[in-house]
Image (cartoon, rainbow, N blue to C red):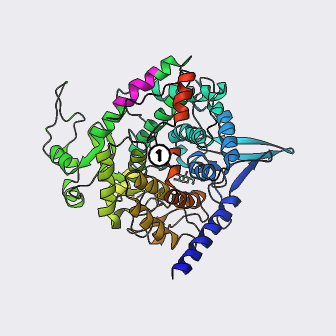
Amino acid sequence: MQIENLATDESTEKAAWEALEKSILYYRGRPIGTVAAYDNSVEALNYDQCFVRDFVSSALIFLVKGRTDIVRNFLEETLKLQPKERQLDAYKPGRGLIPASFKVVSDNGGEYLEADFGEHAIARVTPVDSCLWWIILLRAYVVATKDFSIAYQPEFQNGIRLIMEICLANRFDMYPTLLVPDGACMIDRRMGIYGHPLEIQVLFYTALRAARELLICRGNQDIVAAIDNRLPLLCAHIRQHYWIDIHRLNAIYRFKSEEYGKAAVNLFNIYVDSIPYYELDKWLPRKGGYLAGNVGPSQLDTRFFALGNLMAIISDLATEEQAQAIMTLIDERWDDLVGDMPMKICFPALEHEEYRIVTGCDPKNIPWSYHNAGSWPVLMWMLTAAAIKTDKTSLARKAIEIAQARLCEDEWPEYYDGKKGRLIGKQARNYQTWTIAGFLLAKELINDSSHLPLVSFDKLPLELVSRACEFEIGSVDPYIS
Ligand code: GLC
C-alpha cells in the first residue's frame, strides 16, 4: 500500500512538472513567466497571459529548483513595464504600478510585451497587489541567489522607490493601512473588499519589510524614514483592530458608539448589530482567532480570508500568539476552512440579499463558488509555509494528502465549489498554473523547510545584514514586539 502511494505521489509530481513546463511563456527566446492556465478547451480570455500574482507561486518553485533565470527575466521585463513618469492622464496607469498581467505580442517578425494595468480586465479592476508581490518576489530572488547586485542596480532601486512612493505618499485617509478600490487583489471582482482589505494590508506590510532590506539608504533617506515610520504603526493597527477572538468579540459586543475625540475606545464606531455575533460566538473555538477581512468607518468585515491570515503568519505581521490561534482555528474548523480541498479563499459565503447587494448579483460569485467561499488549491503553499512557521506541520501534511488524491485526476482546476470544496469549480479552468505550482511548492516546503526564508523574515540572512552595513542599507527590525 505504502509503495503504491509513493508511486502515485511520484506520478502526480511528474505530471505537475510536465504541466508547469508547458505553461512557460517565452519572449525573444527567453523564458519570462508562466501563463495563468494552459487549457485549450475553453476560450482563453486573458488566461493566456502571465499574471504577476499568479507567477509568484511558479517563481518560488523555480527558485527552489535553482531555475533562477526565468525569475530574473520576469523581474527585469516587468520592471520595464512600470510607468516611470508622473501621469496626469486619467486613462494612464499611475507612476510606480506594476501590471496585473502581460502578454507577448508578435509583430512583423519581432515581439513586444503588452501590459494590462486593469484597463482591459473584466470590470476594469486595479491590481494594487502586483507591485507589492513584485517587491516580495525580488527579495525572494535575492535570498535564493544571494545575488544582491540585481536589487542594487539603479533601475531596480528606482522601481522599488516608485512603488514605495505610490504607497506611502499622497493619500486621502490617515490610517496606517492602504486605501484601495474593490477587487484590487486576488479577489479581482466586486466582493465588498474595498477600503482596507486584509490581503492588501498584509502584502503591503511584507513589501515594506522587503523594500526596507533592499533599498540603499543613501539617496533614499526620505523613503526609508517613511517605511520606518509606517511599519510599526501598520503592524500595531492590524494586530489590534483586525484581531477577532472570543475576548475581542466580548469587547466588541459591549462597545459604545458615537464616541468623539481622543478617548474613544470604539475607534471606528462599529455598530454591534452589524456583527454576526451569535454565529461567531458559536464558530470561534475557545483558543482560536483570526484577522478580520476589512476594517473601516463603521465597518468590521468578520469574514475569514485565507491569503491575508496565512501571509500574516508567514511575514510575522501576526504575533506569535495570534499565529498559533489562527492555526488552531484552521485545525478546529477544518471542515469549514479546508474540507475536501485546501482551502477556502474566504468563509463564510455571502448569501441571499447580501450576495445580491455586495457582489452586484455576480453569477460567477454565487454563494460557495469562486471568490465567494470557493476553495483554491494555490493557497496550499501558504498554508504549508504558515504551518511550518507555527510548528503545525501535521496540518499541512493532511492538506497536501487531501489535495494530492484529486488534483491531478481533476486536471488541476483553478478552484472548487461547494461548502466542502467537493465540486470542481463551475467555470474553473483546467491546468491552472498556480494550482500546479502551489501544489509543487507545498510539497517542496514540507519536505525541506529550509526554503521558508524565501518568503519569511524569521532572521535576516546574514549576508543581507553585512551587505546592508556596507551599503548603508536599513537592516534593523524594530517592528516586532
Ligand atoms: C482570476 C483570479 C485572479 C487571477 C486570475 C488569473 O481573475 O481571480 O486572482 O490572478 O484569475 O489566474
Above or below for 373 versus 196: below
- Residue 352 visible in the current orientation: yes
- Overall secondary structure of the magenta section: helix
Q: Residue at x 46, y 34 (%)?
A: 209
Q: Seen from this angle, which residue lies furthest bottom?
A: 1
Task: State the residue at coordinates (24%, 60%).
Answer: 283
Q: Please state the horizontal and vertical placement of residue 224, each as a whole percent of the image.
A: 48, 22
Residue furthest to the right in view is 109
* Left or right, 314 with reference to 107: left
Q: Which residues are magenta?
A: 225-233
Q: Position of residue 353 (x, y in %)?
A: 32, 57
Image label count: 1
Please say if 66 is above or below 479: below
Q: Position of residue 238 (x, y in %)?
A: 33, 38
Of 388 and 331, the residue lying toward us: 388
Q: Position of residue 237 (x, y in %)?
A: 31, 34
Q: Is residue 282 left or right of residue 60?
A: left
* Residue 316 among those drawn in magenta: no
Q: What residue is rendered at 64% in x and 65% in y?
A: 42
What amino acid type is highlighted by mark number 1? Answer: Gly
Callout 1: CB less than 8 Å from ligand 1: no
When the figure is inspected, residue 56 is found, relative to residue 432, above or below; the finding is: above
Q: Label 1's element?
A: loop
Is 136 in front, or is 50? 136
Residue annotated with mark 1: 183
Q: Is residue 228 magenta?
A: yes
Picture quadrant where residue 99 is located: top right
Give the quadrant of the C terminus.
top left
Observer-nearest residue: 142 or 79? 142
Q: Could you classify mark 1 by the number of other residues whose Cα lies within 10 Å: few (under 14), some (14-19), or many (20 or more)? A: many
**Is residue 180 shown left or right of residue 159?**
left
